[in-house]
Amino acid sequence: MYDRHVWEATPGQTLLHRIDVRTKLVLLILLAALILLVDSPRSLFLLFCLALGLHVVARSSPARWRVLMVFVLLGIWGSMTSQALFYSREPRTIIACLLPPATPAFGALTGGVFIYREGLEYGAIQALRSGTMLTLGLLINWTSDPRQLLRSLLSWRLPYELGFMLITGLRFLPVIFQETAVVLTAQRLRGFKPFRTLSPSRLIQTAFQTLFPILARTLRRAATLAASVESRGFGRETPQAVLPKWSRYERFFCHSLLLAVSCLMVLKAVDALQFNGLLYVPSWRGLYDLMKVWL
């Protein structure tokens, strides 16, 4: 996980490495809109499996699969836990009681802490959304040259400052993990064992002795980068390399996907109208049932 090469884009001969960066960005944007549009758990699960399947197509290394699984599982755990404890909608079904309301002090203050079944289900759905976007984002980061990403964003009239900060953040992500590995190694060589115990005081000590050196080293690198960029006159007026021609097949694919997502948006609007009693056509009942299952 702390290996810098795990986070950096690597060249490859797979389909996802060869297609244009603009195609991958369009795919990410449209799938993000589709994820927000769909509420069905089975459809969200299929989209999540599709995102994982793209990693198989890209032949992601085992180290990258481990990183992906760690982040996805942490996101699922955090989303389901938070929603199970703090779910406020009705109805709510209590499946466990962590803190009875009769508990002195904290019980009266919180009204009891419970785990709700509906909260777990809602958290799982939200975790599928965030996990799918995380999976697609890492896929693009691992299969796309950052320079091509910057040129593509600038060709779409994205403000130069935003595009530059975005790509700089992507380039600095591997550096941060590399600095973390260096700091932890230096601490161990000095006899410090950060994970020997899990007491609160030990965790606070670990945080202070690890985070501040990482922050200091990262700030020094950022200052060096800023001086380098300024000395080279890198800015909006700097001539940029011309992007390769966008294949007509890839443009056709993007337009087809855009049309499909637009049709789903129209169907979602029709479903919302009939649900609220504003538009109901009896002959469309089969379509309504289909949208209820998949949308």
Image (cartoon, rainbow, N blue to C red):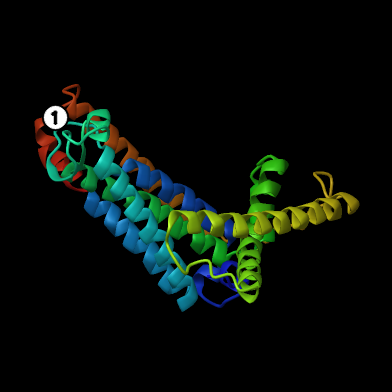
The kind of residue on which mark 1 rests is: Val
- Where is residue 173? Give x, y as percent: 61, 59
Disc 1: CA contacts within 10 A as few (<14), some (14-19) or many (>=20): few
Give the labeled residue for mark 1: 281
Q: Is residue 52 left or right of residue 88?
A: right
Q: Quadrant of residue 62?
A: bottom left
- Where is residue 28? Give x, y as percent: 47, 53
Q: Quadrant of residue 187?
A: bottom right
Q: Is residue 138 left or right of residue 125?
A: right
Q: Is residue 178 above or below residue 216?
A: below
Residue 246 in sight in this render = no
Q: Is residue 125 left or right of residue 32?
A: left
Point out the residue furthest to the top here: 278
Could you say which is closer to the camera, residue 245 or residue 75? 75
Image point (85%, 55%), residue name: 228
Q: Is residue 289 above or below residue 224?
A: above
